[in-house]
Amino acid sequence: MTLAVMMIPLPVLLIPKFLIMNSLGLVNTYFAIILPTMAQPFSVFLMVQFMKGLPRELEESAMLDGATRLTIFAGSFCLW
């Protein structure tokens, strides 16, 4: 499914992305650039591979310090 979505040409997706950002009121903001990029299949694939590459001990030590899974997820992006 991820590969199928990646094969859709960019011009086909431009108008639906604009309409979604317009309905959210995000036109002419940085979020209108960032949000669609984060939701692309390739970006999701890269994020999953990055999270799989983190050592399990790092997550366990964060849990011992009282961090939740959301805190660990958000804090893992500060590593690079």
Image (spheres, helix red, strand yellow):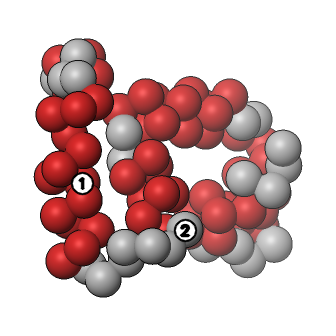
What residue is rendered at 45% in x and 73% in y?
A: 28
Residue corresponding to mark 2: 30
Type of the residue with mark 1:
Lys
Left or right of residue 66, residue 17 in this image: left
Q: Nearer the viewer, residue 22 or 46?
A: 22
Is disc 2 placed on a helix, strand or loop? Answer: loop
Type of the residue with mark 2:
Tyr
What is the crowding at mark 2: few (fewer than 14 residues within 10 Å), some, or many (at least 20)? few
Label located before the other in sequence (2 or 1):
1
Q: Nearer the viewer, residue 25 or 47?
A: 25
Left or right of residue 29, residue 16 in this image: left
What residue is rendered at 16% in x and 33% in y?
A: 12
- Which mark, by number, is residue 17? 1
What is the crowding at mark 1: few (fewer than 14 residues within 10 Å), some, or many (at least 20)? some
The answer to whether 56 is drawn above or below residue 73 in the figure is: above
Is disc 1 placed on a helix, strand or loop? Answer: helix
